[in-house]
Image (tube, coloured by chain):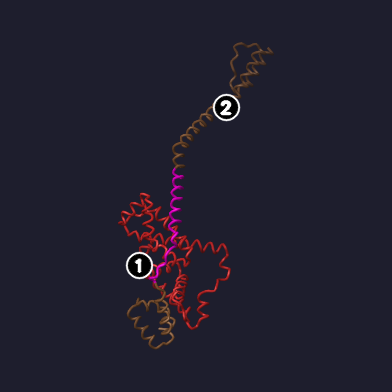
Chain colours: A brown, B red
Amino acid sequence: MKDKEIQKKMLRYIDAQLPQKEMLEIKHHLEGCKTCQKKIQILADVWKFSNPISRKQPSPFLWDKISKRIDNKNQNEILVHKTKFFILQTARPALAAAIVILGLFIGINLGNRITISDLHNQITESTTNQLQNEFGLENFQILSTGSLGGEMATLMANKNN
Amino acid sequence: MKESELIKKIKENDSEAFKIFYETYKNLVYNVCYRMLNNRQDAEDVTQDIFVKAIKSIHKFRGDSKISTWIYQITVNTNINYIRRKKIEIWFSLDFLVGKEESLQDNINNRPDFKFEKKELEALVQQAIQSLPTRQRTAIILQRYEGLSYKKIAKVMKTSLSAVESLLYHAKDNLSKKLTVFLK
């Protein structure tokens, strides 16, 4: 094995986590290589001294901050819950009523809307009335839409006779 | 208080139970955060997030694993997300363009006699661990500093046993390379 390869495996060698064969190979290499020997010694010291058992302690005030955040979150949740309750219990029926009222309003408006055919009928009716007055025809029937021209021609012909 | 009893009380919003829960797991959570982030303030901020998240989502804990495993999972995930967010923030703030302060390696290079305090050696290893990819870093912290078994690490990281072995294999090789470079 080359120096670089050995150095790459040093930590696993220190922790004895290499296969038996590789452990022996490295051991033999170390016996004959002073550079690697020195490096592994230093690395073993560093690895050992960086004590994994030493535990850090969080600040003693950390719990106060956390409990404050939990309380705030609780209050926010209560607010969200209240808003949801308001929407479900009050706003929803109000919205339904508003939709019904709007529906009625639209319905009435649509009902009152004058259609084009209604307009035609109105024009026909007024023209008929005018013709009745002009020609004195009491039993004259309301002209249907589209036949006004024909009726007019008949009446004109009668007048001329 | 038994674990199941504690969980039950937390679910009932018992503030006393919250405190007991915090006292039981504060060191576990804080130490993982500190090792992952290498910064006291960041570690405390993330510890806060973890406890708020854990207490609020305790109803999701089904009890099919130990509560400590569940806490480790939240801790690891929150830290990974934090590191990801921080990387994006640094990228957008263009901080990566600014030169770094004197690193530990510069400090070592100035002292060829290799006489270091224990604290400095700890910092040296810590710095090398920080430079590992996030998943390798997580695996090595859980194994070396938390003393978790490979099986438990696999559970915490939601991965396979062989993946953990591979992560630790690469983590140690990377650390060896980095540390032997530091100590040349």
Q: Report the magenta stretch's main SS.
A: helix
Q: Which mark is residue B49?
A: none
- Which chain is mark 2 on? A
The residue labelled by disc 2 is A113
Whether B58 is drawn above or below B100: the answer is above
Residue A160, percent across and down?
A: 69, 13
For the residue pair A139 and B24, the one nearer the viewer reads as B24
Question: What whole-number distance in Å separates the C-alpha atoms at marks 1 and 2?
Answer: 80 Å
- Asked if residue B163 shows in the view, the reply is no
Q: Amino acid at mark 1?
A: Leu
For the residue pair A33 and A150, the one nearer the viewer reads as A33
Q: Which residues are magenta?
A: A52-81
Tell me, yes or no, whether the highlighted magenta stretch contains residue A55. yes
Residue A115, percent across and down?
A: 58, 27
Tell me, yes or no, whether the highlighted magenta stretch contains residue A51. no
Q: Residue furthest front?
A: A60
User: Which quadrant of the figure contains the N terminus of chain B?
Assistant: bottom left
Q: Which mark is residue B148?
A: 1
Q: Residues within 10 Å of mark 1 (few under 14, many from 20)?
A: some
Which image quadrant is residue B80 in?
Answer: bottom left
Q: Residues within 10 Å of mark 2 (few under 14, many from 20)?
A: few
- Asked if residue B66 shows in the view, the reply is yes
Q: Amino acid at mark 2?
A: Arg
- Mark 1 element type: loop
Whether B161 is drawn above or below A94: the answer is below
Q: Residue at x 53, y 62 (%)?
A: B88
Which image quadrant is residue A139 in?
Answer: top right
For the residue pair B108 and A160, the one nearer the viewer reads as B108
